[in-house]
Amino acid sequence: MSVNESPKVSIVVPVRNETGNIAPLVAEIAAALDGKWRFEIVYINDGSTDGTDAELKRLMAKHPWLRRVRHAQSCGQSAAVRTGVSAACAPLVVTLDGDGQNDPAFIPAMLQALEAGAPRVGLIAGQRVGRKATGFKKIQSRIANGVRGAVLRDGTRDTGCGLKAFRRDVFMALPYFDGLHRFLPALVRRDGFDIGYVDVIDRPRGQGVSNYGLWDRLWVGILDLIGVWWLLRRKRRVPEISED
């Protein structure tokens, strides 16, 4: 992509202490999109204390489509995603985790589904198959998704997948709170948009260890769940207004 062209797609990647996973993932994202969509990659360094920032600066010197936004201290995954989407220059946004478990090869299919469903479809959510996690984490995730689905009835079996494609304006119109990324299907549907799904293959993490806590990754807080349920209940039809 020429530096003078505006991107059509912004890839938003929140990271905390992921030095060894950055370069391989950047290369995979570029390979998946190059020649198909004008793109930018926006990394959000969420208060990393390792060499993440130095690695991002090194890669930015080589790739004009790579950008970095930095949190002075870790604010959590939802805040990092919100920062990245706010900074995005493109009308379409794709998010994915920075540990290498989300395969960028699925991004084109998600973007195609989003474009094909326009303007009714506001979100394409990745649904993981072949989870690369411990049995205990799989059980936790299944319980959390089950409780969320029973309360919110959002029709989504896996909200924990980081791979999501959506319109930037749709996301920015949502109410922001910590944990927002876990409730995107329910909130996007609340605003009158349809949701699409793409099955994606889960991979083992590239290097290092998980940097977001159990609450960030798997469980939804009870207060958040109640709060989103309240938001869904309080949604009212917007009146159609005409003038003679």
Image: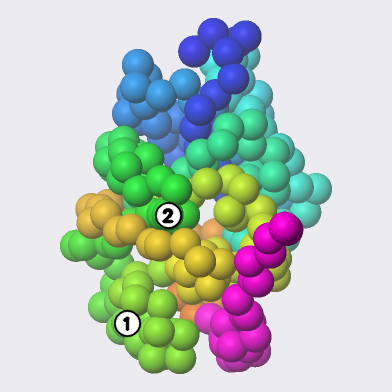
How far from the left and from the top, in percent, is residue 44? 64, 43
- Mark 1 or 2 closer to N-term? 2
Q: Residue at x 69, y 38 (%)?
A: 87
Q: Is residue 158 above or below residue 170?
A: below
Whether residue 154 can be seen here: yes
Q: Secondary structure at mark 2?
A: loop
Q: Residue at x 56, y 67 (%)?
A: 191
Q: Is residue 196 above or below residue 234?
A: above
Q: Residue at x 53, y 81 (%)?
A: 220
Mark 1: amino acid: Arg
Q: Which residue in the protein does label 2 denote?
A: 120
Q: Secondary structure at mark 1?
A: helix
How far from the left and from the top, in percent, is residue 11? 50, 37
The numbered mark at residue 142 is: 1
Specify whether 19 is left or right of 44: left
How far from the left and from the top, in percent, is residue 83? 70, 48
The C terminus is located in which quarter?
Answer: bottom right
Q: Is residue 99 above or below residue 23?
A: below
- Image color mode: rainbow
Q: Is residue 125 above or below residue 39?
A: below
Residue lying at the far front in this picture: please name it.
244
Residue lying at the far right in this picture: please name it.
72
- The answer to which image quadrant residue 234 occupies is bottom right
Q: Which residues are magenta?
A: 220-244
Whole-angstrom CA distance, mark 1 to mark 2, is 29 Å
Specify whether 191 is left or right of 38: right
Q: Is residue 230 magenta?
A: yes
> How many neighbours does mark 1 have within 10 angstroms: few (below 14), some (14-19), or many (20 or more)?
some
Q: Is residue 63 magenta?
A: no
Mark 2: amino acid: Arg
Question: 95 and 242: which one is in front?
Answer: 242
